[in-house]
Image (tube, rainbow, N blue to C red):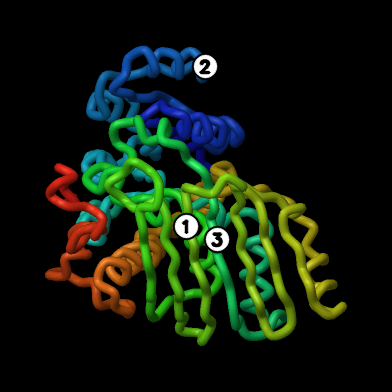
Amino acid sequence: MTTRTCAIVGTGAIAGAHAEAITALPGRARLVGAVDVQPDRAEAFAATWGVPTYPTLAALLDAERPDLVHLCTPPGSHLPLALECLAAGAAPVVEKPPVLSLAELDRLRAAEAAAGVPVATVFQHRFGSGAVRLRRLLAEGVLGRPLLASAHTLWFRDDDYFAVPWRGRWDVEGGGPTMGHGIHQFDLLLSILGPWTSVTAIAERQARPTDTEDVSAALVRFRSGAVATVVNSLVSPRQTSQLRFDFDHATVDLEHLYGYTNANWSLTAAPDVTAAWDSDQADIPSGHTAQLTAVLDALDAGETPPVSTTDTRMTMEFVAAVYASSFTGRTVTQGEIAEGNPFYDSMAGTGAPWLSLADGASTQA
């Protein structure tokens, strides 16, 4: 095993989870520096984690030559920062959403290929032991065919939450709960059920002072024949994150809020399936440490670290399809949002219908 040096750009709340993941893996990862546009916040982070801070990413890259750079900044800054890392030979580990559009993601993928340096997106819910077990049993045929599923992210964010300047804006955040909140749950759904084929969706601004939606709901068809519902909300006082999978031989449920352990999963099945589920006693929580471990394992093995930009594209294309279906009133099929389609360049696409010139707001990214 190699000890990988890591740096963090953006020292807000989520940066703490990244720092904890790095320091939880001594001998495999080492935090060497941080950057933030707010000096006071950077100094507080440096004092907590015992690392130097730098005024710019360029200065950090020059001084530390890190192997991995964790991008924990607002979504609108991810692409230029990731491109800067790739040019310096450092692998970006990018918080969700990784970029603002499919066009930006394809630009990032092209730069990744040219640099020969991998990019990983932070979708940590894929890496808890429950999700790993579920994918394994599905692949082994123990569960039978996937038939029906749901992924519901019902959260609550009040008006004060959106007082932060970059929240709730198409041009900086890229979208509402479909883009920045429920994405964790339906990325897990997609990682289990595989490629989707069509999306029929609605998105609405029900209550929050935003340019973006605060709720969305989608009906999804998968290549396997499975169908699913995906609901994303920021107006739900009883908060929960729920996933349900109905297979030929079992129903598997997951209910949590921001992260899970084995205790959050339940299985309804015949005894032989239950025995197969219970045979794996590993209990690895979903979280940044689990994903960083998987990233380091892949790098040590000379493999592409998860979640790759190829995997990320399926999830980001799903996001674009939800918005495209919602704003055009059509079912959107996989592959149709390509260059020349307005939803390729911006998740806002043709424009959120609740915004008008009277709002004084632009829907374009």
Question: As shown in the figure, which amino acid type bears the numbered disc 2?
Answer: Thr
- Residue position for label 1: 232
Give the residue pinned by disc 2.
Answer: 48
Figure check: 172 above or below 145: above
**SS category of the residue bearing label 3:** strand
The Cα–Cα distance between marks 1 and 3, rounded to whole angstroms, is 6 Å
Residue labelled with disc 3: 152
Q: Amino acid at mark 3?
A: His
User: How dense is the environment of label 2, judged by Cα within 10 Å: few (below 14), some, or many (20 and up)?
Assistant: few
Mark 2 vs mark 1, CA separation in Å: 34 Å
Residue at left offset 29%, top offset 32%:
165
Left or right, 287 with respect to 100, comes to right
Residue lying at 26% horizontally and 39% vertically, measured from the top left: 77
Q: Residue at x 49, y 74 (%)?
A: 194
Q: Is residue 50 above or below residue 100?
A: above
CB contact under 8 Å: marks 2 and 1:
no
Q: Residue 272 is drawn in which quadrant?
A: bottom right
